[in-house]
Amino acid sequence: MRSMDASAGDALLAGLLGRFSVGAKHLVEPAPSLEALHRMTEAALRAPDHAGLVPFRFAAVRGDARERLADLFEQAAVLAGKNPAEASLDRGRALNAPLLVAVIARIDPAHPVRTPHEQWMTVGGALTNFLNAAHALGYGGKMLSGAKVRAAPVVAAFCEPGEQLVGWVVLGTPRKAGSPKFSKPDAAEVMRDWP
């Protein structure tokens, strides 16, 4: 395996250290193109693969499909007993960002070699790579989850038998340059020598 030169490594690390989550209300058009989504997915496929196992897939919610997702969010809110105003707010959440990408896990509990834990690690690595690639391409985004990932009408629309809806990545162009909302702990607090 070829090593990367120091300047390329520094640029890659600077990009990773400069990434932070951007919420849907702070994202505007343009959203990633289909070509950009494919590049981001290629990055996701480079996550720890545990011998080629790919326990995830993505579903881009673009254009008119956002209205259909908004209908599903509103329907789920009504089924959950929310009043019309609350259901309307939930509907609006599907329309806040220029683009949403559903993250769907296909965990095989009976896999002969890879445990569910290893498969979930791959899903997490894929999501991280996807978001880092979005940032490298100039887009902002954030992973969202919540009760809707278990709402029957939403799950039925996105999942095949044996799949789980993990959540959505909201994507778009950051409205303005910013900084992380929350301070992160110092690296020395997180990485320590074992006894």
Image (cartoon, helix red, strand yellow):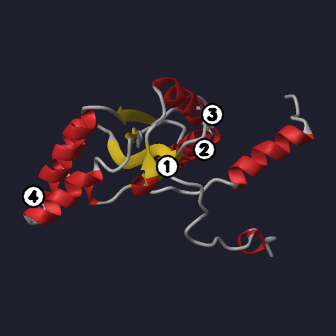
| The N terminus, quarter of image | top right
Q: Which residue is mark 1?
A: 141
Q: Nearer the viewer, mark 4 or mark 1?
A: 1
Q: CA distance from mark 4 to mark 2?
A: 35 Å
Quadrant in which the C terminus is drawn = bottom right
Residue named by callout 3: 46
Asked whether residue 34 appears in the rendered view, the answer is yes
Residue 135 disc label:
2
Give the residue type that dot 4 points to: Val
Secondary structure beneath label 1: strand
Q: Find residue 41 and report its horizontal and vertical position in percent.
A: 53, 31
Q: Is residue 183 left or right of residue 92?
A: right
Look at the picture and state if 70 lies above or below 44: below
Label 3 neighbour load within 10 Å: few <14, some 14-19, many 20+: some
Location of residue 136 by image quarter? top right
Q: CA distance from mark 4 to mark 1?
A: 28 Å
